[in-house]
């Protein structure tokens, strides 16, 4: 588990409600540990999830801290900055809140649009419906409230945080880079990011399913994807819609995921000679955008930037 809202909560991992008493919780842990123990035929990754869940809620003090939204410690083996879309250097009560403006004076990438903005709007609407229309919400990003929400609602916030994490990485690439966020893709919804670097123009999807994923038959799959969800196909369609609207061709398409979601920095979807997309660990995104995986040649940055600025629409 990371600290992403898309992750299963410790209670979900152990298979009990958050209202379970301590004895019920202990029995659930023992049962889950037996079922997942590698020496008894279980899965090592799931066994580790069970151990991390128990570290977080297995004692009265730890459980009180978790239920209150405290993150005073990170269990050994949990992800750090590159592995969790929710991680922030000043994490605390505001760990899920929108990022504040940076105060340093380093040159930044040119940025247009609002990263994660649409995803946050969808999350806030879904949270409001879950709490109950008319019921007051003092702080929609209160960790206690977020962690008690159904997982499909938490995942909406996880998507916003993933988009913001990508935006932060791109911003640090400097003034030679331009990025557009939340591009209108018409009937296909939106494209999370279009990133222009000297190596090319990249269509980028940032996502966090809260669990590992794999590549099968030209698509991203995993146990926490929604039924019928096809991330690569959806990215291709969104990129084509933006390309048709702007008449600017993308160099490639990237699906950016938390480090903990995959075992390799970059995985090719489709033919190695002409990939449909690349699935990229967040910590490797800068390398890919800097041209390590780019086709030979370069692009006319100024021409593409001008054409996009004149034609792009935002959601």
Image (cartoon, rainbow, N blue to C red):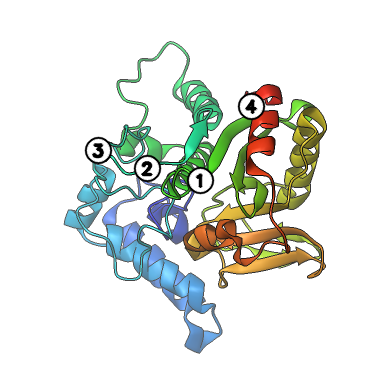
Question: In 3D space, how far apart are the residues under numbered discs 2 and 4 (Cα atoms)?
Answer: 20 Å
Quick check: 249 left or right of 259?
right
Q: Nearer the viewer, residue 252 or 61?
A: 252
Q: Position of residue 184 (x, y in %)?
A: 68, 27
Mark 2 / mark 1, whichever is N-terminal: 2
- The vertical placement of 156 against 83, above or below, is above
Q: Is residue 171 above or below residue 309?
A: below
Q: Outermost residue, top direction?
A: 134
Q: Position of residue 116 (x, y in %)?
A: 51, 34
Q: Which badge, 3 or 2, comes first in the chain's sequence?
A: 3
Q: Is residue 212 visible?
A: yes
Residue at horizontal 54%, vertical 77%? 43
Q: Mark 2 = which residue?
A: 107
Q: Which mark is residue 176?
A: 1
Q: Which one is in front, 85 or 12?
A: 85
The tag earlier along the polypeptide, 1 or 4, is 1
Please state which of the two labelled residues, at mark 3 or mark 2, is closer to the viewer: 2
22 or 216: nearer the viewer? 216
- Cβ atoms at labels 1 and 3 below 8 Å apart: no
Upstream in sequence: badge 4 or badge 3: 3
Question: Which disc, if any, is residue 309?
Answer: 4
Residue beneath disc 3: 93
Looking at marks 2 and 4 on the same chain, the residue that comes earlier in the sequence is marked by 2
Picture coordinates of residue 68, whole percent (x, y): 24, 42
**Circles 1 and 4: CB atoms closer than 8 Å:** no
Front position among marks 4 and 3: 4
Q: Is residue 116 visible?
A: no
């Amino acid at each position: 588990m990371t600290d992403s809202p898309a992750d299963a909560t410790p209670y979900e991992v152990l298979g009990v409600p958050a209202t379970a008493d301590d004895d019920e919780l202990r029995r659930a842990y023992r049962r889950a540990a037996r079922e997942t123990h590698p020496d008894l035929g279980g899965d090592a990754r799931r066994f580790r999830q069970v151990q991390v869940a128990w570290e977080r809620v297995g004692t009265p003090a730890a459980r009180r801290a978790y239920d209150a939204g405290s993150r005073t410690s990170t269990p050994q083996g949990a992800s750090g900055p590159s592995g969790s879309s929710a991680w922030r250097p000043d994490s605390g009560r505001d760990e899920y809140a929108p990022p504040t403006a940076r105060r340093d004076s380093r040159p930044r990438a040119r940025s247009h649009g609002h990263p994660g903005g649409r995803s946050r709007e969808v999350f806030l609407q879904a949270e409001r419906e879950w709490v109950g229309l008319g019921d007051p919400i003092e702080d929609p990003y209160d960790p206690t409230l977020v962690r008690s929400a159904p997982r499909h609602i938490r995942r909406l916030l996880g998507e916003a945080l993933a988009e913001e994490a990508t935006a932060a990485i791109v911003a640090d690439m400097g003034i030679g880079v331009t990025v557009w966020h939340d591009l209108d893709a018409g009937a296909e919804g939106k494209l999370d990011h279009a990133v222009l670097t000297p190596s090319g123009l990249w269509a980028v999807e940032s996502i966090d399913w809260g669990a590992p994923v794999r590549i099968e038959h030209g698509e991203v799959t995993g146990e926490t994807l929604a039924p019928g969800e096809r991330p690569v196909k959806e990215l291709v369609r969104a990129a084509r819609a933006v390309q048709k609207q702007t008449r600017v061709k993308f160099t490639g398409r990237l699906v950016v995921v938390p480090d903990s979601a995959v075992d390799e920095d970059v995985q090719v979807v489709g033919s190695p000679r002409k990939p449909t997309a690349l699935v990229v660990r967040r910590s490797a995104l800068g390398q890919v955008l800097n041209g390590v995986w780019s086709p030979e040649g370069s692009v006319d940055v100024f021409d593409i930037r001008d054409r996009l600025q004149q034609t792009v629409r935002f959601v």
